[in-house]
Image: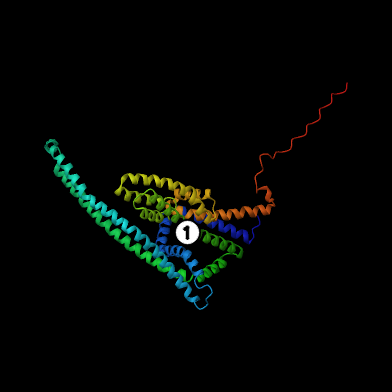
Amino acid sequence: MDFNKGNIKGLLLVICGGVAFYCILQNLGTVIAAVVWLFGILSPFLLGCAIAFVLNVPMRAIERHLFPAATRGAKTRRPLALLLTLAAVLGVLALASWVIGPGIAEAAGSIASQVPVAIRRLQAQLEKLSAYLPMIQDFIAELDMDWQSLSRKALEFAQSLGSGLLSSGGGIIGGVVSGVSTFVIALIFSFYILMQKEKLSRQGRQVIYALLPPRRGDRLLEILRLASRTFSSFLSGQCLEACILGTLFVVAMTLFRMPYALLVGVLVALTALIPIVGAFIGCGVGALLIAIDDPWKALWFIVLFLVLQQVEGNLIYPHVVGSSVGLPSIWVLAAVTLGGSLMGILGILIFIPLCSVLYALFRDFVKRRLRQRGVPEEKWREAPSLMERKPARQARPAKKPPAK
């Protein structure tokens, strides 16, 4: 091999990469702790980027239709679109709380009304047990146990439990305060991103072209645009699928005369924003609410849920979400299964658009390779028919017998 400048540079990069990888493996615990610490510092800004990306989907549609031909209102179009987006999100949350709140209050009232009946039943059971009280006293008297030691251990256990509850309560309060402050910082940061997204995008392109060759920079920007379109389409498809599923539950429960039809439909629609598994959370809450009114109807509700879940998971979800992200239905199910098994709910949220990006990149790579190899389209467009067979070989002429 000729040791020119390019080869030496590549060899040095390989050696440095190997040494760095070896050092990381030797200090894996320290590296993981450093990464966790770094993510803890950057968590408000990462959350702000995620909030900005989600809010940008409806905000972009609103801004596109807000004063499209006006030139004077160009400066106020962006702030007004942001305010309308926030108003729409808050309106949806308020509408959901307006539907859910009275139903929860009614269920709580029903539970409170059944408490006196339960207390009377408990008193009746205790009165029945009082007949066996002398027998129980004799049995306890015959036991040879150190009651002082037991009472001391019970007191120590109660003290440790109380101190644990106090410390965990302080930790919970601290966690709530930290979470609220992180969310507020992330929300403000997302507003800055949405107000200056063109400027930030231009600065990002400058950094990419400053660090990478033009060809690789173009390819990286193409992949980022594809990922942005795919994730935006995934959010839109997920919201549409949640609305369809909630509507199905409202209609079906109304037809079967089940209580809390609108409440359960809204709960299922909200929890269905979590792909595949979110609707089961709504099913549990809905079954609990219906069981307060009628346990048999709760059982039939679970049967109805299983039927609608099969229809939604195998027919509606792959077609709606798969068509929105450009991913075939079979690969949507594969992405959901793989993401859920690896990373849980977060993996389900990430793997569908991620697999869609990888699918699009691999599809472009395959088509480009077919063009480079000059493979005609009729070779792969349709499979050959079973009737098409190779022509039969011509029968060889019989050998003449040797002359005598």
Residue 53, placed above or below residue 149: below
Residue 103, placed above or below residue 256: below
- Name, please, the residue furthest toward the bottom: 72
Q: Position of residue 359 (x, y in %)?
A: 56, 53
Q: Classify mark 1: residues with Cα within 10 Å, few (<14), some (14-19) or many (20+).
A: some
Instruction: Tell me the quadrant of the picture where the N terminus can be found.
Output: bottom right
**Can you see residue 27?**
no
Q: Nearer the viewer, residue 283 or 249?
A: 249
Compared across the picture, whether 239 is left or right of 127 comes to right
Snapshot quadrant of residue 27:
bottom left
Q: What residue is drawn where x is 39% and y is 49%?
A: 255
Total number of numbered labels? 1
**Can you see residue 107?**
yes
Q: Secondary structure at mark 1?
A: helix
Q: What residue is drawn where x is 61% and y is 63%?
A: 215
The residue that label 1 is drawn on is 235
Instruction: Tell me the quadrant of the picture where the C terminus can be found.
Output: top right
Q: Position of residue 403 (x, y in %)?
A: 88, 23
Compared across the picture, whether 28 is left or right of 117 comes to right
Compared across the picture, whether 329 is left or right of 397 comes to left
Three-letter residue code for mark 1: Leu
Q: Position of residue 200 (x, y in %)?
A: 50, 69
